[in-house]
Image (spheres, grey):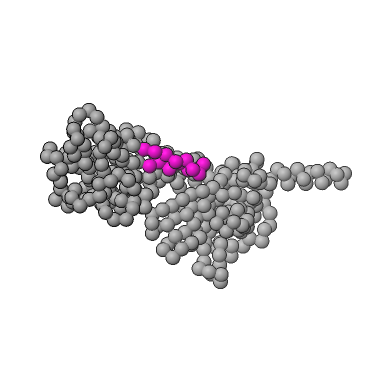
Amino acid sequence: MQFLKKYFLFSLLLLFSCSKNGIWDDPQCIYNELGVTSLNSEVYPSSVRNPVDWQGKYSEQSVEVNYNYPTGFEGQNDTFGFVFKKEGSCINFDYSYSNYDDPYTGFSFVKPIEIDSFELQEYIEDIKIVGQITFYNPYTRETETKKFWYIYSTEDYFDTNTTYVTFNNCTNSSIPISIDLNNDNIDDFSITSDEDNSPDHLIKYSIEVFSLNNNIILSNTSLSPYKIIFEPPFSSSNKREDNSYIENTLAVFAEYQPPLDNFNHWITTNWYGYYIDFINSIDDYIIVKVEKDGLFYYGWIKIRVNYEDCIFEVVETYLNAIPNEHVSVP
C-alpha cells in the first residue's frame, strides 16, 4: 500500500513537471499555496532599486506575463516574457523570451530562454494570474525564480489573428533590381538580398547594392564603412572612388522563427542600413561611375525606400554623356 502511494505521488509529479525545453504535457490546473501576495506585483521592490512591475496581456488563445529590466542609461531595457496557451479553463506553457531594446541606437534582439518550472497559486481567465516561474537568465547566467501577481485589465487584450510580415512577402515583387545605366543590355549595378541564419532562431535579411564589372559606387570620405547614400545638394566631385569598405547595405530585416515571429521587424538604425536617411522627405541617391569602351562616365541612381510600406524601387537614373565630367543635383 505504501508503495502504491509513493508511486501515485511520483506519477503526479511527473505529470505536472516541466521538461528542460519548457514544455508541459498537460494543462496546468493544479494550484498550490506559494506565499505569493500582491506585494509580488513588483518584480523588484522600490527598497532594492527603482521598482519594476509585472505587466501582462491576453488574447483568445494565450496569456502572458512579462517585466522590463533596465540595462543602461539611455533607455536600454530587456523584457522577459512568459507566454501560456489557453486550454479550456487551464493554461499550458508555450514559450518564453527576452527582448533587448536600445532606443538610443534603434537596435533590438529577441532570443528564446529556457524555463525549468512554473507553478500556479491562482488563475482566473482574463482577470488574474498568480504563481512563480524558474528560468535561466542568459545575461546573469544564473537560474532565477520569480514570483508574480498580475491583474489584467481590458487594455491588456490583444488580437493574435495577425499575419506577421516576413521578408519574402514584403520584397517579393521588388527585389532583386537590375540597373543598366548605359542601355547596352549589360547590368551595371544590382540591388539584391542576402541572408544570415545565425543564430538558429533568427534570419537576418540584408538588402544590398553592388557594382558589376568595372563600375564604381562613390562614397563619402569619412571613416569606414564609407556611406553611399547622398541627399541633395551634392556633387560627384571630391568623393571616394573605391568599392572597398563601403556601406552597401540599404536595409536589414530581422525575421524570427515561430513562435517569435511576432517580433519580425526592420532594423531602424543607421548602424545597419540607412533607416534615418530613408524616413525623411529628402530624395536619396547613389552616385556611380560607369565604364564604357575604356572611358568613365559619372551618374546617379535615385532610389525610394520605405520599410513599413515595403517599397524598394529605383525611381530614376542618369548617366552623363561626357566622359569624366562630374554630375550634381542641386
Is the residue 119 above or below the residue 294 in the image? Answer: below
Residue at the (42%, 62%) spot, across then down: 75
The magenta stretch spans residue 204:
yes
Bounds of the magenta segment = 193-206
The magenta stretch spans residue 69:
no
Residue at the (62%, 46%) spot, across then down: 22
Residue 80 visible? The answer is yes
What's the magenta bit mostly, secondary-structure-wise?
strand
Which residue reaches farthest left?
322
Residue at the (22%, 42%) spot, across then down: 288
Is the residue 207 above or below the residue 79 in the image? Answer: above
Which residue reaches farthest top?
185
Is 284 left or right of 22, judged from the image as shown? left
Q: Position of residue 29 (x, y in %)?
A: 65, 47
Q: Position of residue 230 (x, y in %)?
A: 23, 49
Q: Position of residue 101 (x, y in %)?
A: 44, 55
Image quarter (top left, top right, bottom left or bottom right) of the N terminus: top right
